[in-house]
Image (cartoon, helix red, strand yellow):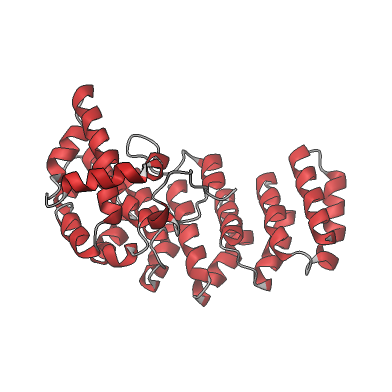
Amino acid sequence: MPLRLPGTTLSSTLRHAWPGLERVVDQQAEPFIRLEVSLMNIIRINVAFLALSLNSLLGQQLNWEKLFDGLTNDNLTISDAARAETFGTVIPRLVTEDVGSLKLELKDLLPQFNRNEKIRLQASGFLYTVSFGRKDSALALEEWFPILMKQLNDPHLRVRYNAALTISALQPSIPVIFMEPLRNATENEDARTAVAAVSGLGRLAATNEQAATLLDSMVTTAPRPELKLAALNTIYRQQLRQPRYATAAIAALDDSDSNVVKEAVRTLELFAPSITKRVTPKIRELQLRTKDTELRDLAQRLLQHMER
C-alpha cells in the first residue's frame, strides 16, 4: 500500500510527499530513516501545535551545535529534551518557513558534518526531512546538491542511505543532474542505498529516457533481487504505464525469486485489461502450479482485474 498520512498532519506541506518503497525496504532492511524515532512522528505533528511552536521560535536562529549535542548526549534527560525540541519545533520550522530563511538555517548545518559519526547521521536525517516535507525542496536544497552526490559514497552507510533518500524525495521533481549519481548508487553494496536510488530513477523515468531504459532493464537484469523488487515497486508507485514496463513485468514472472514474481503480478494490475490476451494463460498456469498461497491469491486478483 502507498504511504498513507495520518489524520492530523502537515497536510499542506506533505501532500506531495514521496510515495515510498516501504514494502521493499521492510523486506530488505529497516524502515525509512529515523532521527532515533520513526519518521512518521514528523508527519503526525498537530497543525495547531505547529503554529504555537513556530511563534515561539520567531526571529531565533537555530543552534545546531547545541541541538546535536543534546540529541547525542548519553544523559536521557538531556537527549529527551532535545528530541522534544526536534519534533516539536525544529522540524515544523524547517518544513514551513520561507525558502530564503531555510537556506540560511541549512548553511549553519554544514559544519555539523565535520563532527562525529553520530552527529553526521543526525544532520543527514534533517536534510531528508526537508526533502520529504517540502514541496520546494529541490530549490531549498540546491546548494547541497554537490554534497549529497558525494555522500552517496559516504563511509557511514546510514549517511549514504540518507543521501539517496534525500535525492529521491526532492520536490517537485528530481533535477536531471542526479541521473548519473543515482545510476551509480544502484550498484552500491549497501542494499538500502541501492533501493532508494532505484526509487529516484523511477521518478526520473517519467521524463528521462535514459532513466526509463535503466529502470526497464533492471526488472529482469539487476544482479540482486532487491533491485528487481525496487524497480517493479517503483513502476507501480509512479504509475508508469508505458508498454515497455508491461513487457518487463511479464518477463519477471519467470524470475527464480518468488518475491520478484509476486511483485511482478502486482505491477501487472497497472496494465489490465490491455494485457489480458498476453498474460492470462501464463497467470492461470502460475496459479495452478504454485504452492505459495499469497502468490495464488495475487494471481487470482489479477485475473479478476483483467476480466472487468
Residue 298 vs residue 218: left or right? right
Image-quadrant location for residue 139: bottom left
Q: Residue at x 40, y 37 (%)?
A: 38
Residue 60 at x, y percent in the picture: 11, 49
Depth check: give the residue in front, 305 or 174. 305
Depth check: give the residue in front, 199 or 133. 133
Q: Residue at x 34, y 65 (%)?
A: 136
Instruction: Check the image and report above or below for 256 versus 183.
Output: above
Image-quadrant location for residue 76: top left
Residue 268 vs residue 57: left or right? right
Instruction: Check the image and report above or below for 231 versus 257.
Output: below
Query: Is residue 141 visible to us here?
Result: no
Residue 30 vs residue 143: left or right? right
Residue 155 at x, y percent in the picture: 29, 47
Quarter of the picture holding the C terminus: bottom right
Residue 55 at x, y percent in the picture: 20, 47
Residue 256 at x, y percent in the picture: 70, 49
Q: Residue at x 56, y 45 (%)?
A: 23
